[in-house]
Image (spheres, rainbow, N blue to C red):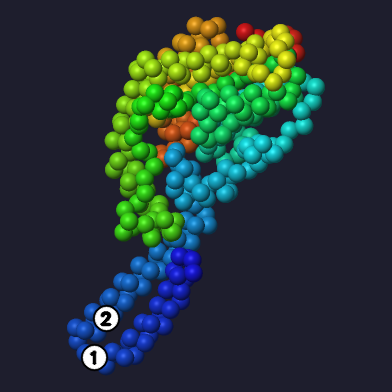
Protein backbone atom coordinates (compact mmCIF):
# COMPACT_ATOMS: atom_id res chain seq x y z
CA UNK A 1 0.00 0.00 0.00
CA UNK A 2 1.40 3.38 -1.01
CA UNK A 3 1.81 6.28 1.45
CA UNK A 4 -0.95 8.22 -0.31
CA UNK A 5 -3.32 5.26 -0.10
CA UNK A 6 -2.64 5.16 3.63
CA UNK A 7 -3.38 8.89 3.90
CA UNK A 8 -6.64 8.53 1.97
CA UNK A 9 -7.56 5.60 4.21
CA UNK A 10 -7.06 7.75 7.31
CA UNK A 11 -9.16 10.55 5.82
CA UNK A 12 -12.00 8.14 5.09
CA UNK A 13 -11.85 6.15 8.32
CA UNK A 14 -11.33 9.06 10.69
CA UNK A 15 -14.98 10.26 10.77
CA UNK A 16 -16.13 6.66 11.26
CA UNK A 17 -13.69 6.16 14.10
CA UNK A 18 -14.70 9.43 15.78
CA UNK A 19 -18.38 8.56 15.44
CA UNK A 20 -17.67 5.25 17.15
CA UNK A 21 -15.75 6.89 19.97
CA UNK A 22 -18.46 9.52 20.51
CA UNK A 23 -21.17 6.87 20.55
CA UNK A 24 -19.23 4.91 23.14
CA UNK A 25 -18.21 7.79 25.40
CA UNK A 26 -20.82 10.48 24.84
CA UNK A 27 -22.60 9.50 28.06
CA UNK A 28 -19.58 10.82 29.93
CA UNK A 29 -20.01 14.23 31.45
CA UNK A 30 -17.93 17.31 32.12
CA UNK A 31 -14.28 17.76 31.28
CA UNK A 32 -13.76 14.41 29.58
CA UNK A 33 -16.44 15.09 26.97
CA UNK A 34 -15.05 18.59 26.34
CA UNK A 35 -11.52 17.22 25.98
CA UNK A 36 -12.74 14.51 23.61
CA UNK A 37 -14.45 17.05 21.37
CA UNK A 38 -11.47 19.40 21.30
CA UNK A 39 -8.98 16.62 20.57
CA UNK A 40 -11.11 15.15 17.80
CA UNK A 41 -11.54 18.57 16.19
CA UNK A 42 -7.81 19.32 16.44
CA UNK A 43 -6.72 15.97 15.02
CA UNK A 44 -9.39 16.03 12.33
CA UNK A 45 -8.59 19.58 11.25
CA UNK A 46 -4.87 18.81 11.09
CA UNK A 47 -5.43 15.59 9.17
CA UNK A 48 -7.75 17.11 6.58
CA UNK A 49 -5.61 20.25 6.22
CA UNK A 50 -2.58 18.07 5.60
CA UNK A 51 -4.55 15.99 3.12
CA UNK A 52 -5.71 19.07 1.21
CA UNK A 53 -2.24 20.59 1.10
CA UNK A 54 -0.76 17.26 0.06
CA UNK A 55 -3.21 17.04 -2.84
CA UNK A 56 -2.23 20.54 -3.96
CA UNK A 57 1.53 20.07 -3.64
CA UNK A 58 1.39 16.67 -5.32
CA UNK A 59 -0.70 17.73 -8.31
CA UNK A 60 -0.21 21.45 -8.82
CA UNK A 61 3.07 22.61 -7.29
CA UNK A 62 5.86 22.21 -9.86
CA UNK A 63 8.88 24.38 -9.01
CA UNK A 64 12.54 23.65 -9.68
CA UNK A 65 15.28 23.78 -7.09
CA UNK A 66 18.99 24.11 -7.73
CA UNK A 67 19.97 20.72 -6.34
CA UNK A 68 17.06 18.77 -7.81
CA UNK A 69 16.31 16.78 -4.66
CA UNK A 70 12.83 17.96 -3.69
CA UNK A 71 9.49 16.52 -4.70
CA UNK A 72 8.40 19.88 -6.09
CA UNK A 73 11.41 19.60 -8.42
CA UNK A 74 10.36 16.09 -9.42
CA UNK A 75 6.98 17.57 -10.31
CA UNK A 76 8.75 20.23 -12.39
CA UNK A 77 10.74 17.57 -14.24
CA UNK A 78 7.59 15.57 -14.99
CA UNK A 79 5.63 18.63 -16.10
CA UNK A 80 8.29 20.70 -17.86
CA UNK A 81 11.89 19.50 -17.55
CA UNK A 82 11.51 16.30 -19.56
CA UNK A 83 9.90 17.90 -22.59
CA UNK A 84 10.67 17.77 -25.36
CA UNK A 85 12.94 14.73 -25.35
CA UNK A 86 14.86 13.78 -28.48
CA UNK A 87 16.62 10.63 -29.65
CA UNK A 88 19.84 11.75 -27.93
CA UNK A 89 18.05 11.69 -24.59
CA UNK A 90 18.35 15.47 -24.32
CA UNK A 91 15.75 18.14 -23.68
CA UNK A 92 15.26 19.38 -27.21
CA UNK A 93 13.19 18.81 -30.28
CA UNK A 94 14.19 16.32 -32.94
CA UNK A 95 16.00 18.34 -35.58
CA UNK A 96 16.20 17.57 -39.26
CA UNK A 97 19.71 18.69 -40.09
CA UNK A 98 20.04 20.22 -43.51
CA UNK A 99 22.95 21.51 -45.56
CA UNK A 100 23.61 24.47 -43.28
CA UNK A 101 26.51 25.47 -41.10
CA UNK A 102 26.31 23.88 -37.68
CA UNK A 103 25.68 25.90 -34.54
CA UNK A 104 26.75 23.69 -31.65
CA UNK A 105 25.73 24.70 -28.14
CA UNK A 106 27.49 22.56 -25.56
CA UNK A 107 26.89 22.94 -21.86
CA UNK A 108 25.29 21.75 -18.65
CA UNK A 109 22.08 22.57 -16.80
CA UNK A 110 22.39 26.28 -17.67
CA UNK A 111 22.12 25.46 -21.36
CA UNK A 112 19.62 22.64 -20.84
CA UNK A 113 17.27 25.19 -19.27
CA UNK A 114 17.11 24.07 -15.66
CA UNK A 115 14.09 25.80 -14.13
CA UNK A 116 12.82 27.24 -17.42
CA UNK A 117 9.35 25.89 -18.15
CA UNK A 118 9.34 26.45 -21.91
CA UNK A 119 12.49 25.16 -23.62
CA UNK A 120 12.05 27.79 -26.33
CA UNK A 121 13.01 30.43 -23.76
CA UNK A 122 16.58 29.10 -23.47
CA UNK A 123 19.30 31.28 -24.96
CA UNK A 124 20.16 28.68 -27.62
CA UNK A 125 16.58 28.54 -28.88
CA UNK A 126 16.10 32.32 -28.72
CA UNK A 127 19.31 32.73 -30.73
CA UNK A 128 18.12 30.12 -33.21
CA UNK A 129 14.92 32.10 -33.73
CA UNK A 130 16.88 35.29 -34.32
CA UNK A 131 19.03 33.51 -36.92
CA UNK A 132 15.87 32.70 -38.90
CA UNK A 133 16.79 29.18 -39.91
CA UNK A 134 20.20 29.95 -41.38
CA UNK A 135 21.95 27.53 -39.03
CA UNK A 136 21.51 23.95 -37.85
CA UNK A 137 21.27 24.14 -34.06
CA UNK A 138 22.84 21.12 -32.36
CA UNK A 139 22.16 21.50 -28.63
CA UNK A 140 24.25 19.17 -26.46
CA UNK A 141 23.54 20.03 -22.84
CA UNK A 142 22.45 18.18 -19.73
CA UNK A 143 22.48 18.86 -16.02
CA UNK A 144 25.51 17.42 -14.28
CA UNK A 145 27.76 17.35 -17.32
CA UNK A 146 31.29 18.57 -16.69
CA UNK A 147 33.99 19.47 -19.19
CA UNK A 148 35.15 15.89 -19.76
CA UNK A 149 31.65 14.61 -20.48
CA UNK A 150 30.90 17.57 -22.73
CA UNK A 151 34.04 16.89 -24.76
CA UNK A 152 33.09 13.24 -25.07
CA UNK A 153 29.54 13.92 -26.26
CA UNK A 154 30.55 16.73 -28.59
CA UNK A 155 33.23 14.59 -30.23
CA UNK A 156 30.81 11.70 -30.71
CA UNK A 157 28.03 13.80 -32.24
CA UNK A 158 30.18 16.11 -34.35
CA UNK A 159 31.93 13.11 -35.88
CA UNK A 160 28.63 12.33 -37.56
CA UNK A 161 28.75 15.59 -39.52
CA UNK A 162 31.21 17.03 -41.99
CA UNK A 163 31.49 20.30 -40.10
CA UNK A 164 34.38 22.14 -41.65
CA UNK A 165 32.77 25.44 -40.79
CA UNK A 166 30.38 26.71 -38.18
CA UNK A 167 30.22 27.86 -34.61
CA UNK A 168 30.71 26.17 -31.25
CA UNK A 169 29.17 27.93 -28.26
CA UNK A 170 30.71 26.34 -25.18
CA UNK A 171 29.00 27.13 -21.89
CA UNK A 172 31.06 26.88 -18.72
CA UNK A 173 30.03 26.92 -15.05
CA UNK A 174 32.36 27.09 -12.05
CA UNK A 175 31.65 23.58 -10.81
CA UNK A 176 33.11 22.17 -14.03
CA UNK A 177 36.43 22.08 -12.17
CA UNK A 178 35.12 19.57 -9.62
CA UNK A 179 36.24 16.60 -11.70
CA UNK A 180 39.79 17.93 -11.72
CA UNK A 181 39.67 18.52 -7.98
CA UNK A 182 38.62 14.93 -7.39
CA UNK A 183 41.26 13.70 -9.82
CA UNK A 184 44.02 15.16 -7.64
CA UNK A 185 42.49 14.07 -4.35
CA UNK A 186 40.51 17.12 -3.24
CA UNK A 187 37.18 16.39 -1.55
CA UNK A 188 34.29 18.78 -1.26
CA UNK A 189 31.36 19.14 1.12
CA UNK A 190 28.22 17.08 0.69
CA UNK A 191 25.44 19.03 -0.99
CA UNK A 192 22.80 16.29 -1.03
CA UNK A 193 21.38 15.17 2.29
CA UNK A 194 18.83 12.70 3.54
CA UNK A 195 16.27 13.73 6.11
CA UNK A 196 16.74 12.40 9.67
CA UNK A 197 15.64 8.78 9.95
CA UNK A 198 12.65 9.61 12.16
CA UNK A 199 11.30 12.09 9.57
CA UNK A 200 12.02 10.11 6.40
CA UNK A 201 8.62 8.34 6.19
CA UNK A 202 7.00 11.78 5.96
CA UNK A 203 9.66 13.76 4.07
CA UNK A 204 10.41 11.07 1.50
CA UNK A 205 6.80 10.12 0.78
CA UNK A 206 4.65 13.24 1.11
CA UNK A 207 5.04 16.32 -1.04
CA UNK A 208 3.88 18.85 1.54
CA UNK A 209 6.11 17.46 4.29
CA UNK A 210 8.98 17.39 1.80
CA UNK A 211 8.37 21.05 0.94
CA UNK A 212 8.26 22.06 4.61
CA UNK A 213 11.39 20.16 5.57
CA UNK A 214 13.62 21.25 2.70
CA UNK A 215 12.31 24.80 2.85
CA UNK A 216 13.27 25.10 6.50
CA UNK A 217 16.53 23.24 5.91
CA UNK A 218 17.56 25.57 3.10
CA UNK A 219 16.59 28.65 5.10
CA UNK A 220 18.66 27.57 8.11
CA UNK A 221 21.63 25.94 6.43
CA UNK A 222 21.86 27.33 2.88
CA UNK A 223 24.25 30.17 3.75
CA UNK A 224 26.60 27.82 5.60
CA UNK A 225 26.51 25.23 2.81
CA UNK A 226 27.12 27.94 0.22
CA UNK A 227 30.19 29.15 2.11
CA UNK A 228 31.56 25.61 2.39
CA UNK A 229 30.99 24.89 -1.28
CA UNK A 230 32.53 28.18 -2.40
CA UNK A 231 35.57 27.44 -0.21
CA UNK A 232 35.91 24.09 -1.96
CA UNK A 233 35.71 25.65 -5.44
CA UNK A 234 38.34 28.21 -4.42
CA UNK A 235 40.53 25.34 -3.27
CA UNK A 236 40.13 23.61 -6.63
CA UNK A 237 41.06 26.77 -8.54
CA UNK A 238 43.95 27.64 -6.22
CA UNK A 239 45.48 24.17 -6.11
CA UNK A 240 48.20 24.03 -8.79
CA UNK A 241 47.59 20.36 -9.60
CA UNK A 242 43.84 20.77 -9.89
CA UNK A 243 44.08 23.88 -12.05
CA UNK A 244 46.67 22.32 -14.35
CA UNK A 245 44.48 19.25 -14.80
CA UNK A 246 41.52 21.47 -15.60
CA UNK A 247 43.57 23.80 -17.81
CA UNK A 248 44.45 20.83 -20.00
CA UNK A 249 40.74 20.06 -20.35
CA UNK A 250 40.05 23.67 -21.32
CA UNK A 251 42.89 23.54 -23.84
CA UNK A 252 41.15 20.63 -25.51
CA UNK A 253 38.08 22.85 -25.81
CA UNK A 254 40.24 25.52 -27.48
CA UNK A 255 41.60 22.92 -29.88
CA UNK A 256 38.11 22.17 -31.15
CA UNK A 257 38.50 25.12 -33.48
CA UNK A 258 40.95 23.04 -35.49
CA UNK A 259 39.19 19.74 -34.84
CA UNK A 260 42.27 18.50 -33.00
CA UNK A 261 40.09 16.95 -30.31
CA UNK A 262 38.44 14.59 -32.79
CA UNK A 263 40.12 11.32 -33.67
CA UNK A 264 37.55 9.44 -35.77
CA UNK A 265 37.20 11.83 -38.66
CA UNK A 266 40.22 12.37 -40.89
CA UNK A 267 41.94 15.65 -40.09
CA UNK A 268 41.22 18.51 -42.44
CA UNK A 269 41.45 22.30 -42.25
CA UNK A 270 38.61 23.83 -40.33
CA UNK A 271 37.32 27.37 -39.98
CA UNK A 272 35.31 27.26 -36.80
CA UNK A 273 34.36 30.03 -34.47
CA UNK A 274 34.55 29.17 -30.77
CA UNK A 275 32.57 31.30 -28.31
CA UNK A 276 32.82 30.47 -24.61
CA UNK A 277 30.19 31.56 -22.11
CA UNK A 278 31.49 31.68 -18.53
CA UNK A 279 28.99 31.73 -15.67
CA UNK A 280 29.75 32.80 -12.10
CA UNK A 281 27.38 31.85 -9.30
CA UNK A 282 24.41 34.06 -10.12
CA UNK A 283 23.35 34.19 -6.47
CA UNK A 284 26.80 35.53 -5.56
CA UNK A 285 28.41 37.16 -8.59
CA UNK A 286 30.78 39.37 -6.61
CA UNK A 287 31.94 36.48 -4.43
CA UNK A 288 32.67 34.14 -7.36
CA UNK A 289 33.78 36.59 -10.01
CA UNK A 290 37.49 35.94 -9.35
CA UNK A 291 36.95 32.29 -10.33
CA UNK A 292 34.95 32.99 -13.48
CA UNK A 293 37.45 35.69 -14.46
CA UNK A 294 40.28 33.15 -14.20
CA UNK A 295 38.55 30.88 -16.68
CA UNK A 296 37.62 33.77 -18.95
CA UNK A 297 41.23 35.02 -18.90
CA UNK A 298 42.52 31.61 -19.93
CA UNK A 299 40.28 31.48 -22.99
CA UNK A 300 41.03 35.09 -23.89
CA UNK A 301 44.75 34.30 -23.76
CA UNK A 302 44.04 31.70 -26.44
CA UNK A 303 42.28 34.28 -28.63
CA UNK A 304 38.88 32.76 -27.94
CA UNK A 305 35.79 34.95 -27.88
CA UNK A 306 34.40 35.03 -24.33
CA UNK A 307 31.07 36.12 -22.89
CA UNK A 308 31.74 36.73 -19.21
CA UNK A 309 28.32 36.56 -17.59
CA UNK A 310 29.68 38.44 -14.58
CA UNK A 311 29.97 41.45 -16.89
CA UNK A 312 26.65 40.90 -18.62
CA UNK A 313 24.57 40.32 -15.48
CA UNK A 314 26.64 41.99 -12.77
CA UNK A 315 24.34 45.00 -12.53
CA UNK A 316 21.24 42.98 -11.68
CA UNK A 317 19.91 41.70 -8.39
CA UNK A 318 20.06 37.93 -8.01
CA UNK A 319 16.28 37.75 -7.84
CA UNK A 320 16.03 39.40 -11.28
CA UNK A 321 18.20 36.88 -13.12
CA UNK A 322 17.69 33.55 -11.32
CA UNK A 323 14.82 31.10 -11.54
CA UNK A 324 13.64 31.37 -7.92
CA UNK A 325 14.86 31.63 -4.34
CA UNK A 326 15.87 27.95 -4.28
CA UNK A 327 17.27 27.77 -7.82
CA UNK A 328 20.28 29.81 -8.88
CA UNK A 329 20.11 28.94 -12.57
CA UNK A 330 19.59 31.68 -15.13
CA UNK A 331 15.95 32.58 -15.69
CA UNK A 332 14.19 33.53 -18.92
CA UNK A 333 15.30 37.16 -18.77
CA UNK A 334 18.96 36.23 -18.29
CA UNK A 335 18.73 33.77 -21.17
CA UNK A 336 17.15 36.40 -23.40
CA UNK A 337 19.87 38.93 -22.55
CA UNK A 338 22.53 36.34 -23.39
CA UNK A 339 20.90 35.43 -26.71
CA UNK A 340 20.64 39.09 -27.68
CA UNK A 341 24.29 39.66 -26.74
CA UNK A 342 25.43 36.68 -28.81
CA UNK A 343 23.38 37.73 -31.81
CA UNK A 344 24.40 41.38 -31.67
CA UNK A 345 28.11 40.73 -31.19
CA UNK A 346 28.76 37.61 -33.25
CA UNK A 347 26.01 37.08 -35.81
CA UNK A 348 24.10 40.24 -36.72
CA UNK A 349 26.91 41.82 -38.74
CA UNK A 350 27.96 38.60 -40.41
CA UNK A 351 28.49 39.30 -44.08
CA UNK A 352 29.01 35.73 -45.20
CA UNK A 353 26.75 32.80 -44.41
CA UNK A 354 28.53 30.37 -42.16
CA UNK A 355 31.09 32.87 -40.90
CA UNK A 356 30.02 34.77 -37.80
CA UNK A 357 31.55 38.13 -37.12
CA UNK A 358 34.48 38.42 -34.76
Q: Secondary structure at mark 2?
A: helix
Whether residue 128 is visible here, answered yes or no, is no
The answer to whether the residues at label 2 and label 1 have Cβ atoms under 8 Å apart is yes
The residue at the point 62 percent across, 38 percent down is 91
Residue 59 x, y percent position in the rendering? 53, 57
User: Residue lying farthest right?
Assistant: 99
Q: Give neighbour class at mark 1: few <14, some 14-19, many 20+ (Cα, 10 Å).
A: few
Residue 44 x, y percent position in the rendering? 36, 73
Residue 102, by quadrant, is top right
Viewport quadrant of the C terminus: top right
Residue 136 x, y percent position in the rendering? 73, 25
Classify 116 as above or below 295. Answer: below
Classify 216 as above or below 245. Answer: below
> Which residue, given by chain and number where applicable, does mark 1 sit on?
28
- Work out whether residue 31 or residue 177 is closer to the camera in this orientation and state it: 177
The residue at the point 67 percent across, 36 percent down is 88
User: Residue lying farthest left?
Assistant: 31
Residue 285, by quadrant, is top left
Which disc number belongs to residue 159?
Answer: none
The residue at the point 39 percent across, 42 percent down is 192
Left/right of residue 336 with respect to residue 235 in the rendered view: right
Q: Give neighbour class at mark 2: few <14, some 14-19, many 20+ (Cα, 10 Å).
A: some
Amino acid sequence: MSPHQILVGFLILYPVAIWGVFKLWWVSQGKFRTLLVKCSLLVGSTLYLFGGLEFYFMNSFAVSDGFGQTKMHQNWIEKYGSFPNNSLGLRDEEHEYLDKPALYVVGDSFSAGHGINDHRDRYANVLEQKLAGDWDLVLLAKGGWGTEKQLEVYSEISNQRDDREGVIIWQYYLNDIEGSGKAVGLSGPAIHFAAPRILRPLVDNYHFANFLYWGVFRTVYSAKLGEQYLAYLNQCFDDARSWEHHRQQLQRVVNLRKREELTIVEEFPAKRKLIVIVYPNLKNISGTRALSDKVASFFESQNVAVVNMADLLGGFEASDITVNALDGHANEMANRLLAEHLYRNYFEQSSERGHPSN
